[in-house]
Image: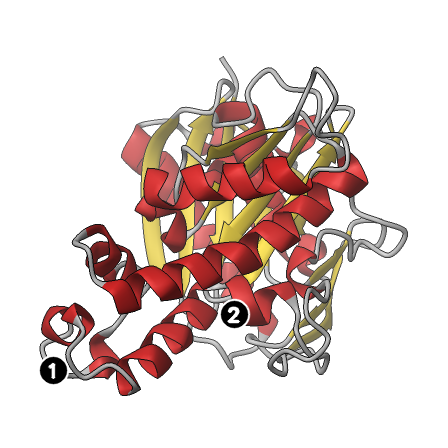
Amino acid sequence: MEYYIGIDLGGTNIAAALVEEQGKILGRANLATGAGRPAAEIAADMAHAGRRAAEQAGVPIEQVSAVGMGVPGTANQKEGVLEFANNLGFLHEPIVEMMAGCFPGKKIWFDNDANAAAWGEYLAGGGRGADSMIAVTLGTGVGGGIILGGKLWNGVNYGAGELGHMVIDRNGPECNCGRRGCFEALASATALIGQTREAMDSAPGSLLWELCGGDKRMADGRTVFEAAGRGDQTAAMVVERYIGYLAIGVTNLVNIFQPEIICIGGGVSRAGELLLEPLKRLVAEEDYARDSSVHTDIRLAELGNDAGLIGAALLGRR
């Protein structure tokens, strides 16, 4: 059996796992990222977390075949350089060389963190057995990854898969990328929370206030679905509008790629069928190939936060 270390580098935490060849996690470790430090220091802590994960699994580091990393920003795989990661303050950092120095003789792989998560979901989660899959992650932003013909699609400059920055309403709110009405600005968990709080201001009698303890700052991505499920009309209107935005973006992806599977993940996906059933219905109505006998299967992701660790560990299968 072969073993791999997968590392998920975030702005707050470094997560590491020892993963066997079928995608099962055998050991874990976590460290604080300490964003703002030099890249070499953070790379050393990534290596330390990886070694701790192997130790927890009881696997000697000599038996580890490779180390894979999911990193925020643009991962130039040809040069082994993390070109830009704004939340870490990285610019043109030779991250592969740094990690190779920490793991002499090991193969070192890396990719964008959203791509790594999509790859993990494809290999060991909701995309198992498919030829093509698109992952859509509804979190702070809208992330994702594209797998076509069993291969991750990185684009000519390793920047493909920024699903959150297609415009779905050019008159919509400004996105942090500088455009207006991006998918992310309307369908992320952050956007949903903002829409919920805005609706609460105009509905003092809404159940949403009770669920938030009278403080709208306590609203999160689950609050509005819970209130809607309990019959609150204000919450139901927010959910309907939000899923409408989500359906526009997902339909665009279906119409462009017609993949076998679209996996919906991230915190908002925990709403389950309250999210999935109306989303599938709306996409089915707008799918350009709606009269075809075969359609994209829209389903919930399965691996949660483990997707990035598993995908990073198994990046050698790209």
Q: Is residue 312 visible?
A: no
Instruction: Say which amino acid is labelled 2.
Output: Glu
* Residue lying farthest to the bottom in this orientation: 201
Mark seen at residue 249: none
Residue 78 x, y percent position in the rendering: 85, 49
Residue 251 x, y percent position in the rendering: 67, 45
| Residue 39 falls in image quadrant | bottom right
- In screen coordinates, is 105 left or right of 311? right
The residue that label 2 is drawn on is 41
- In screen coordinates, is 77 left or right of 203? right
In this view, 317 is above or below 208: above
- Residue at 33 percent of width and 44 percent of height: 274
The residue that label 1 is drawn on is 214
Instruction: Say which amino acid is labelled 1.
Output: Gly
Q: How is the image coloured?
A: secondary structure
Q: Residues within 10 Å of mark 1 (few under 14, many from 20)?
A: few
Q: Is residue 258 visible?
A: yes
Q: Quadrant of the C terminus?
A: top right
Q: Earlier in the sequence, mark 2 or mark 1?
A: 2
In this view, 270 is above or below 24: below
Q: Residues within 10 Å of mark 2 (few under 14, many from 20)?
A: few
In this view, 243 is above or below 288: below
Q: Nearer the viewer, residue 111 or 178?
A: 178
